[in-house]
Amino acid sequence: AGEARGEPCATWRQRFRERVTRLEWVVPTAVEGDAPPPARAFHSACLVGSSVYIYGGEAKDTPWGLPFNDMHVLELADFPAKLTWRKCRTSGGAPCLSRHTCTAVGDRLFVVGGWNGRVRTAAGHVFC
């Protein structure tokens, strides 16, 4: 799949391998786009291509962990030169969740289970 994209994907893989092989932490020199999401715990993060999708979670200062229902994307295509944040505009009543799972299958994200602020849930949701 990556080979069909040509040089950018190969370059990304090469840069990633170099960083992991050297065990080097890198602080990006530029962060662009929308404001980063507020600090949170018990969220999910899922890599699709060169984008990390971050969904739900709880703020540290929220009593009894009232969860978020927002989704943010961190674009890594130009890493380590820059990172780009954007907030996704979702429709269909995204559930407020924390402590859930998120799995990428193709270009869809499957979110299962979690805490909705009142009870544990086993419901499943798909973001397309």
Image (spheres, rainbow, N blue to C red):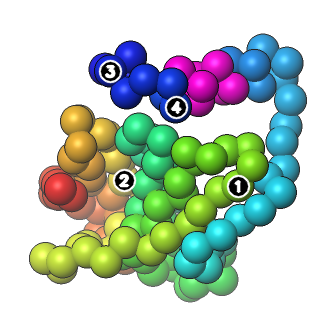
What's under tag 2, amino acid-wise? His
* Quadrant, the N terminus: top left
Residue at horizontal 61 percent and vertical 79 percent from the top: 35
Residue to which mark 3 is pinned: 4
Can you identify the residue that label 4 sits on?
Answer: 8
Element under label 2?
loop
Is 93 on the left or on the right of 116, as rendered?
A: left
Toward the viewer: 119 or 22? 22
**Identity of the amino acid at label 1?**
Lys
Task: Check disc 2 and report the residue beneath it.
Answer: 100
| Residue 27 coordinates in the image, percent (x, y) | 84, 50
113 in relation to 66, above or below:
above
Stretch of the chain drawn in magenta: 10-16
At which x and y percent is residue 121? 23, 60
What is the crowding at mark 1: few (fewer than 14 residues within 10 Å), some, or many (at least 20)?
some
Q: CA distance from mark 3 to mark 1?
A: 24 Å
Circles 3 and 1, Cβ within 8 Å, touching? The answer is no
- Is 63 included in the stretch rendered in magenta? no
Circle nearer the N terminus (4, 2): 4
Q: Is residue 111 left or right of residue 41?
A: left
Q: Amino acid at mark 4?
A: Pro
Circle 1 sits on which residue? 82
